[in-house]
Image (cartoon, grey):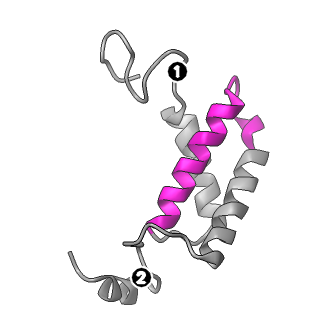
Amino acid sequence: MAPASTLASVRGTTPFHRDGVLYPNEMQVALAAFDAAVASLHEIPDCDLADARDRLAEYISNHALLGEVDVDRLRSGALNFLKTGGMRAVGTAWGRTAASGLSV
């Protein structure tokens, strides 16, 4: 893998954080995206709000750590993630049914 400095020059930003930390400006972007996504949860019918907030936080923090710095892309990506199966079905482990092991 190319060093972060080389990848940063290609994208114009650091594409990931080896230390796993969001710095203040990145945290502000992630928080703004999270707030906007939570405000839009009414777009997803029959969702468990507590689980949806957890999934949003996970998606947004992971993508922010990968270098995404656009609030709208983080928000829309997180909402699309929930709409297309990012929500856990009740009584299942993440992505798999408890009994059968089949993807949900």
Disc 2 secondary structure class: helix
Q: How many marks?
A: 2
Task: Judge whether 72 appears above or below 8 on screen.
Answer: above
**Which residue is rendered at x = 69% and y = 62% of the image?**
31
Label 2 environment density (alpha carbons within 10 Å; few <14, some 14–19, many ≥20): few
Q: Between residues 36 and 80, which one lies in front from this camera angle?
A: 36
Badge 2 is on which residue? Answer: 11
Q: Amino acid at mark 1?
A: Ala
Q: Position of residue 23 (x, y in %)?
A: 58, 76
Q: Which type of secondary structure does the marked residue at label 1 adopt? A: loop
Relative to 65, is 104 above or below? Answer: above
Question: Could you tell me the amino acid type at mark 2?
Answer: Arg
Q: Is residue 11 left or right of residue 60?
A: left
Q: Which residues are magenta?
A: 40-66
Quadrant position of the N terminus in the picture: bottom left
Q: Position of residue 22 (x, y in %)?
A: 54, 70
Image quarter in which the C terminus is found: top left
Q: Which residue is mark 1?
A: 89
Residue in view at x 59 percent, y 59 percent: 74
Picture quadrant where residue 61 is located: bottom right
Local crowd size for mark 1, using a 10 Å CA cut-off: few (<14), some (14–19), many (≥20): some
- Whether the residues at callouts 1 and 2 have beta carbons within 8 Å, the answer is no
Which is more N-terminal, label 2 or label 1? 2
Q: Residue furthest top?
A: 99
Q: Residue at x 75, y 54 (%)?
A: 35
Q: Pinpoint residue 85: horizontal percent, then vertical percent.
A: 49, 32
Q: Give the main secondary structure, helix, strand or loop, of the magenta stretch.
A: helix
- What label sits on residue 104 in the rendered view? none
Give the residue drawn at x 60%, y 41%: 54
Residue 89: x and y in percent read 52, 21
Q: Is 6 on the left or on the right of 63, as rendered?
A: left
